[in-house]
Image (cartoon, rainbow, N blue to C red):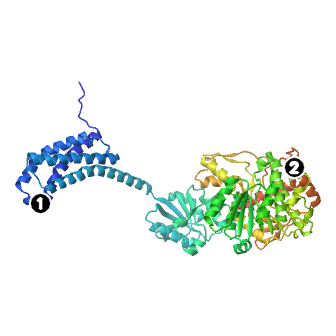
Amino acid sequence: MKKQKYFWMEHWQVIRLGLIIYDSLAVIFSYFLALWLRFDCKFSMIPEEYFQAYIQFIPIYTIVCILVFWSIRLYKSIWRFASYSELLRTIVATIITGGFHIIGITVLFHKMPISYYLFGIVIQFLAVLGIRFSYRFILLERGRLQKRRQDVRKHRVMLIGAGAAGQMILRDVIKAKETTDQVCCIIDDNSNKWNRFIEDVPVVGGRDDILANVEKFQIDKIFLAIPSATAEQKRDILNICKETGCELKSLPGMYQLVNGEISVGAMKDVSVEDLLGRGQIRVDMNEIFQYLTGKTILVTGGGGSIGSELCRQIAGRHPKQLIIFDIYENNAYDIEQELREAYSELNLVVLIGSVRDSRRINRVFAQYRPEIVYHAAAHKHVPLMEVSPCEAIKNNAIGTYKTAYAAMRNGCQRFVLISTDKAVNPTNVMGASKRICEMIIQTFDKMIKKGREDELPVLHAHREDEDGSMRGVYSKGQAKAKTEFVAVRFGNVLGSNGSVIPLFKKQIKKGGPVTVTHPDIIRYFMTIPEAVSLVLQAGTYAKGGEIFVLDMGSPVRIDTLARNLIKLSGYKPDVDIKIEYTGLRPGEKLYEEKLMAEEGLKTTPNHLIHIGCPIAFDMEKFLEQLQELMYTSYENREDIRELVAEVVTTYHPAGKKGSQEKNKEYERLLGEVAVTREG
C-alpha cells in the first residue's frame, strides 16, 4: 500500500502567502481610508457614486497590485535583510499601481477627488512597506533582547572589606543600572561584623572563609576594597583569592577614599606587582623638583625602559631642556612623540648616536652643555652578552668612560650612572662590565677631588688619532673640573625590556608552556616608576663617588612569580598551563646580591636608599687595564674574559664551583623567600 503524502509548505512559502493576503487587505483598506478621510472621516457623507466606483474597481485593482508586486519580486526577498533595494522596488510598485488606479477608476467608473488618489497612494505605500521593514525590525530587536538577556547574566561578586570603602562599592553596585555585578557576600576580618548584614548582603566571615564562601555562593568576581591595608596585608589576602580562579579587582589606594572617588569604575585588575607584598615607595618629590627645575638634563639610552621612564619623570619637573640620546631610533621616536603630546611646553631635543663614538658624544656635550646626566645606555641582556663579550665591554665600560670624560670636560655638574645588582660578585660579562662602570665613576671622582683630572687618558678608537690628537676636541686648561660622579644600583624592574613578566604573559597567551630557568632561582624586583623615582632622589643626595643601593625588598622566587601570573590569568599552573624548567642560561646565577660584603652601608634621609662604602683599588693600574680592555674589545679577541677577571677581581664566571660563603648566602635568601611566602 502506498504511503499517503500530505500537503506541506516551506516556511518562506507560508510567509509569501501571508504577505499576499496582507497586501490584498492593505490595498482595499488604503483606498477606503482615503475616501473616508476625504469626506471628514464620516462614512455617511461619502457620495453614493464615489463609493460605488470604489466597490466596483477595488477587486480589479487588488488583482493588478498582486501581479505587479509579484513581477517586481516583492514576494521573493528575504525581508530580515531588507535594505535599499527592497525600498526602491516598493516605490516603483507603488508608482505603477497608483498610476493604474487613477486611470482605471476614472475611465471605467467615475472620476474621483484628487485627494482620494493622493491619500490612497501614500497610505498603500506605507502599509506595504511598513509590514516588510517592521518584520526586519522585530527580528533585530528580538536578537538584541536575547543578546541583552545573555549579557545581563549577573556576575556573582564577593566583596572583601566591610569598612567605608566597601560600603561605597556595595551601594555603587546596587544603584548602577547597567552593571552586571551582584554582591552576594562580604568578607571582613572584624569578627564583630560577622553574621550581620549591609544593604541586605551578609558578612560571612574573615579571610579564612574566602575559599569556602566562593564555592558556597558560586562567586566569579572578587572586589578587594580595603584601601588602608598595607602591602603585606593585601598580599596575604590576594594570595588566598588567587587560588579561587575568580576575576580579581582592587582599589589602588587610600587617596581615593579621601577624595570620594570610591566606585566600581575606580577598581583596577590585580597585577602580579600586588603579590610582591612590598610597601609603597615614597620619595620627596619636592626635593627632586627643586633639583631638576630649570636644568639642562641629558639621558643616555633615553629610549629604553629605564631611560624612557627617567625622561617621563624629568619632563614633569620643568627642566630648562631635556636631551634624549639613544642609538635605537624607533624607541627614541616613541618617547619623543609621547613627551611632545604630554608636555607641549617642554624644550625637548632627541639625538641619535652611540656612547661608543667619542667624537659624537663630545659634540653633544659641547653643544648643549647638560648640567645633569643620567647614563642609562647599556647592553643589559646577560645571555646575549655572554655570546658577545667584547660588545659588552665596548658599550658598557668604554662607552661609560667616554661619556663621563665628555661630561667632565664640558662642565657637567652631576653624572649619575644606572648600575645593577649583577655588578656585585658578577658571574657574567654583563655584570662585570657594569662593575667596571662603577669603578670608572669612582676613579673620575677621586681624580677630580685630587685635582688630577688631566691625567685621565682620552680613550678613542679612531685610527687617525693614534698620536693622541683626540685631546684636541676637549678644552684643556679650562676651569677646574667639578663634576660629581655617582652610581645607583638596583635589581630587576618589572615590565622592562627583556624582563620575565612580558615573556611569561606572551607564553600564557599562547597557552604555554611557561619557561623558568630553575625552580629555585630568586631575584629582587621593583617597578620601573619606583626605581626611577629613587634614582632621581639618589641624585639629589650625591656628593661624588657614592654607589647608591636601592632597597629592593625581599627576594622573589621566579617560579612563584610565574605560578602567580598563571593564576591571575585564570588558569591553573601545571594543569591548564605547564611550567618547564630550562636550566640556567650562560652567565646566569641563582641569586643576585645587592651589595658586596666589604662595602657596608650608610644611611640616607630615605630609608630605601643606602650608600655603599667604596672598595679601594689601584686607580693607575685600573686606567692602564681599561686602555688594554678597549684595544682588546675592539680587536674582538677571545681572551677578553681573562682580562676582565684581572680588572674585576670579584668576577667569577658561572659554572665554577661557588664558595661556602656564597652557598650560605643563597640559603639565607631562600629562607627570606620562605618567610615572605608564609607571610
Q: Position of residue 511 (x, y in %)?
A: 60, 46
Q: Secondary structure at mark 1?
A: loop
Residue occupying image coordinates x 52% and y 66%: 264
Q: Position of residue 263 (x, y in %)?
A: 52, 68
Amino acid type at circle 1 is Phe
Asked whether residue 246 is in view, the answer is yes
Q: Position of residue 468 (x, y in %)?
A: 91, 55
Q: Is residue 375 left or right of residue 67?
A: right
Asked whether residue 573 is in view, the answer is no
Crowd rating for badge 1 (residues with CA inside 10 Å; few <14, some 14–19, many 20+): some
Seen in the picture, residue 99 relative to 185 is either above or below; the reply is: above
Residue occupying image coordinates x 72% and y 63%: 323
Q: Quadrant of residue 324?
A: bottom right
Give the spatial CA distance, label 2 vs label 1.
Answer: 109 Å
The answer to whether the residues at label 2 and label 1 have Cβ atoms under 8 Å apart is no
Q: What residue did someone put label 1 on?
A: 39
Q: Secondary structure at mark 2?
A: helix
For the N terminus, the quadrant is: top left
Residue occupying image coordinates x 64% and y 55%: 564
Amino acid type at circle 2 is Arg
Q: What residue did someone put label 2 on?
A: 463
Residue in the foreground of this view, choosing between 461 and 447: 461
Crowd rating for badge 2 (residues with CA inside 10 Å; few <14, some 14–19, many 20+): few
Residue in the foreground of this view, choosing between 39 and 383: 39
